[in-house]
Image (cartoon, rainbow, N blue to C red):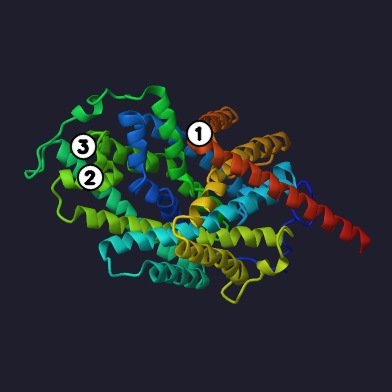
Amino acid sequence: MSLPPQHSGNTSTDFPTAGEPRLQHALKPRQLIMMGLGTAIGAGLFLGSGVGVQAAGPAVLVSYLIAGALVIIVMHALGEMAAARPSSGAFSVYAADAMGPTAGATVGWLWWLQIVVVVAAESVGAAGLLATVWPSLSVPWLSLLFMAVFTAINLLGVRNFGEFEFWFAIIKVIAILAFIVIGAALLLGLLPAAPSPGLSNITAHGGFAPKGLAGIGAALLVVVFAFGGTEIVAIAAAESEQPGRSLARAIRTVAWRILVFYIGSIAVIIAVVPWTSDALKSPFAAVLQVAAIPGAATAITLVAVIALLSALNANLYGASRMIFSLAERGEAPRGLARVNRRMVPLVAVLASVTFGFFATLLELWFPERVLPALLNLVGSTCLMVWTITLVSQLILRRRADRTGTPLPFRMGGFPYVTWLGLAILTLIFALTLLSPDSRVQLLSTFALTLAIAAACEVARRGRSRKGRQQ
């Protein structure tokens, strides 16, 4: 991990020399830690958790525990590698070190494509949600405004980006904690305006697992994607003060973050709202309405808008840094590695947001046709990235142990914990292939991955031939 790349004769895996442009180390530890908290709290929790509840009933808690365990494993594996070698390319760089430049370039481009599509989806989604509160707002113009504002924020420098994400995360954390406190007060009968439903909803309507193992598996497919984006913390660590130490602190918050925010929230939802209820289309609002909290629907909608905008901001940052890293390693046009006087990869930010603007316009011109197709193509990317991350850690940790290389942050339980993570991912892949609804998405992602790998290998061989001729 702290070893030099194993393909040092190939410029695609070498780090830039001291004379080349470098990014600014301006993210403060508090910003990185709150980013770690915030990236896991998105619209998937606020709006999508109800889909998981309806798929498995109260047993969705089991699905969240399995997915949560996987995320904890992946983040600790990624943290171990990133602490040893902070890089804006993160898992792409580590895949290149472990398995060669083509593997690194493939996972980098695959992740970048997913993120720029998701940025467009988040812009349109946030505008649509805000328009439900104020119908007079124009969704197309609001969506484009969001894109322009967060492009500007990303161009102002990493310190400003970090501060925005810090306060976004604070708002989301406060909202979740307030929700859990209100839910607990309701269940304990401490709210005079609302009678306590007790715990009957957990066992009523068919029992704890009304749809059996099949329901838990179906919910797992829904739940696992809610955790997508947590890997951005490893990318951001490269621009933080004392990256190894800051990242280790952020990674250590993963376990209790999942237990408190996800498990706590879902436990409140399944206890208060019957899993058969149509109100689970907006689960947080449903709980607050039972608690007789006025303005609940509006409040949770605004929090969901903030969650989407926070994700848009973080994803645009992550996408720009990934393609910047690819350019530094010769796996993307070199112009994308240029930085401005603020030490921001200006061209990389603009390249990432340009695709987002284009996809946003297409979605606004052809509603519910373009973005769903693009998201279906890259929908399983996080599973591919997590798998490659764990395989990379398995290889690099063994290499470091074999050579006696000290690591600033070590994942406990190696290699058994890493193999457990890969076993969970294998289960998820199997469930995905068995599900008609998700099989096409996974196969599309496989096909896209192979196409990118082929293109990267052809490009690499072309550069190699050109280098020999010169």
Categorize mark 1 by other alpha carbons within 10 Å: few (<14), some (14-19), many (20+). Answer: few
Can you see residue 167?
A: no
* Residue at the spot of label 3: 272
Instruction: Mark 1 or mark 3: name the one nearer the start of the chain.
Output: 3
Q: Secondary structure at mark 2?
A: helix
Q: Is residue 170 above or below residue 284?
A: below
**Near-viewer residue (154 or 415):** 154
x then y, percent, for residue 159: 48, 67
Nearer the camera: disc 3 or disc 2: 2
The answer to which of marks 1 and 2 sits earlier in the sequence is 2
Report the residue marked by disc 1.
Answer: 436
461 relative to 75, above or below: below
* Residue at the image point whose x is 29% and y is 59% from the top: 302
Q: Are marks 3 and 2 in contact (CB under 8 Å)?
A: yes
Q: Secondary structure at mark 1?
A: helix
Would you place residue 50 above or below residue 124 in this image?
A: above
According to the picture, the residue beneath numbered tag 2 turns out to be 286
The structure residue drawn at horizontal position 44% and vertical position 59%, both measured from the top left corner, is 367
> Residue, x 24% and y 43% (percent of image)?
279
Q: Amino acid at mark 2?
A: Ala
Q: Quadrant of residue 324?
A: bottom right
Instruction: Tell which circle, 3 or 2, labels the residue nearer the N-terminal end.
Output: 3
- Mark 1 → mark 3, Cα distance in angstroms: 32 Å
Amino acid residing under circle 1: Pro
Can residue 82 be seen here? The reply is yes
